[in-house]
Image (cartoon, coloured by chain):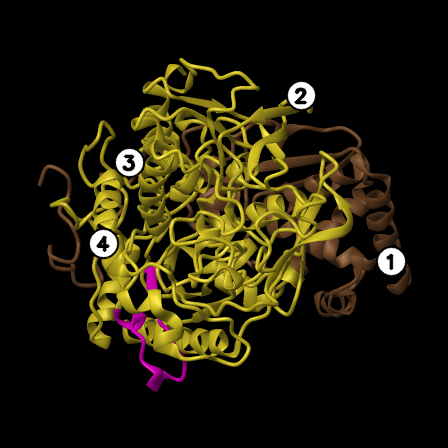
Amino acid sequence: MFSRPLSRRVFLKASGGALVGTLAFASGPIALLAPSRSWAVTTEQFTTHESEALLQFTRHVFPHRDLEDAVYALVVKDLDRQADADPAILALLRDGVTALDRQADGDWLALDATQRQSSVAEAAGSPFFEKIRSSAVVSLYSNPLAFAHFGYQGEEGDMGYLFKGFDDLTWLPDPPVADSGLMPGA
Amino acid sequence: MAQFDNSKTFAHDDDSVVVIIGSGAGGGTLANELAQQGIDVVVLEAGALHDRPDFHADEWPAFSQLSWLDNRTTSGSWRIARDFPNLPTWICKTVGGTTVHWAGASLRFQPHEFQALTHYGALDGANLLDWPVGYDELAPYYTRAEDKMGVTRTNDIAGLPGNNNFKVMHAGAQKLGYACNTGHMAINSRTRDGRPGCQQRGFCFQGCRFGAKWSTLYTELPAALLTGHAELRTNAHVAQIEHDAKGHATGVTYFDKDGNLVRQKARLVAVAGNSIETPRLLLNSASAMFPNGLANSSGQVGRNYMRHMTGSVYATFDEPVHMYRGTTMAGIIPDEARHDTSRGFVGGYEMETLSLGLPFMAAFLDPGAWGEAFTGAMDQYAHMAGMWLVGEDMPRASNRVTLHDELKDQHGLPIPNVHYDDHPNDEAMREHAYLKGSELYAAVGARDIYRVPPYPSTHNLGTCRMSAQAQDGVCNAYGQTHDIPNLFISDGSQFTTSAAENPTLTIVTLAIRQAEHIGKLMKERAV
């Protein structure tokens, strides 16, 4: 499906803080792309706990039930990069996770999903929430794993769909030639 | 890239040249049309050169590569000011300007749209005016523009084949009794003018890799350079237009790629920086003689900013669509473009298919949104069809580009603030358009229908408008400013009103006509 193989780094890098997991959908579109069912994303700034909290938080902001954690981990990676470049962002995100944990009397991740969801809703509009939302709305949906999951072909379109399905919709009648033009050469 | 090499260069103190600021639909076309007459032109383009091999088939990287991202501020009640406060527009800073990004829709304005005040009457809160030029005068120039640009379904050029997104729109149009075809597009359906036919990539907005879509980048500009009468300077950001004691333009100063301030003399200056930068430059060129900015005796420079009434409707279906395959604007319904006040508003709107890739769908579906309503839509991305609604918006004196009091750009020049409030007519038209777009998709069995708010503006118009009387506008019917005879406006800033149609064809049409007029004035030594 993709003209370029995915970097193995996305799946197999390990040092410092890390998110690790196993693909939930062994035969899903992402598994077809992955060199291995196991994946790991490392972070420079965030601890493993912070990374896990940020990942869960992002899942509550943009809840796609069947979307692999491996894709949400790319948002954490994006936030980590931003935190690495700007201490104010690091403080915002670190303090935000600390505040979540404090509200949960210890470990926000130990709360059940409903409780977590309500704390995310409470945070809506805060700088912490907005940093995660505004980053995730870009990084969650702008990567080859997300493309595969949501059915967008990305760079595969670069050479054109003229002979690769640009008009392959069959559940509606074909428009007459007067309204739609002929294929070149036809 | 030999076709962009300057075979001829001009001295900075050569005051016989025409300086053109901007290389997009207006500036790029004007440059070629003048050079073909043997008139020497220097094109100053603020952006860098990115040609077809450089384009990205990836929305965010392409956006970073091509867009005008210099800081701007916004104010007013438009939602853009909340969601994208520093990005009022989606236009380009690159050789070829926004013709690199445009979707290619090339529709003539309707005759009555040149006489908006006459046909619509005076509306409260609107600054309507008739154009000083009419459809009949422009018709032969429209014909030349369509030939130059290779517009489908004109000049015996075949229409483009329709993609999946078009099929959905067409089926809905049939149910509602609308006409719908693959439109008048400046996209080659067959090889023409040395450029190949469309390969249906679906990356029209990101720059056409094959050059099937008309852009000044690989048509007008290389053709101009080939004459030996044109020089293209890239990364040249104009700071000021200068004038003499008689109030005539004498040249410009610009920052070159190294940040050095350079002075280029000129016999005539034409400004085509798009409707934010054009008035900004005139305002930033204020002098003792022209304290309110150049060509601004009317006070209209920067006012009457129009961006079209826009909005989008996306709908999801049980079966897949894959709308992103193929031309971005694949089909057009003209039925609602008529002027018919029984709908509760003046003017009209076009319905045009549109698709966004996954990254931009996330960014623009409902900016700021989160939670299951948002993700539920994204989950259905592959089953989604979409259309853009684009119609006439009202010129308002208070919708305005002004200079920021404090903030400066990378060159130390005051940045622009863009203020916009929808007119009640715009709101009524948008509501009608949302309803009709929704009805269309409901008629083909839509599951969910989404009303998507306006994107940052690609159609920016009116901030140096044409007028018959000098007190009503900035320039005359040829784009020549009322105040300074050798200063011309050559982009969509000239538009007196916005009409419903995508503006590029009319910008090119006006540039062809303007070039002819400038050639005549120069021959007569009138400028």
What is the C-alpha distance between the residues marked 3 and 4? 25 Å
- Shown in brown, the chain is A
Look at label 4 and name its amino acid: Ala
Q: Residue B50 appears at what percent x and percent y? A: 47, 27
- Helix, strand or loop under label 4: helix
Q: Give the residue pinned by disc 4.
A: B139
Few, some or many residues within 10 Å of mark 4 (<14, 14–19, 20+): some
The mark lying in front, picked from 1 and 4, is 4
Q: Chain of mark 1?
A: A
- Helix, strand or loop under label 1: helix
Q: Give the residue pinned by disc 1.
A: A101
Which of the two labelled residues, at mark 3 and mark 4, occupies the earlier sequence position? Answer: 4
What is the C-alpha distance between the residues marked 2 and 4? 44 Å
Give the residue at x 64% y 70%.
B77
Look at label 3 and name its amino acid: Ala
Q: Which mark identifies residue B212?
A: 3
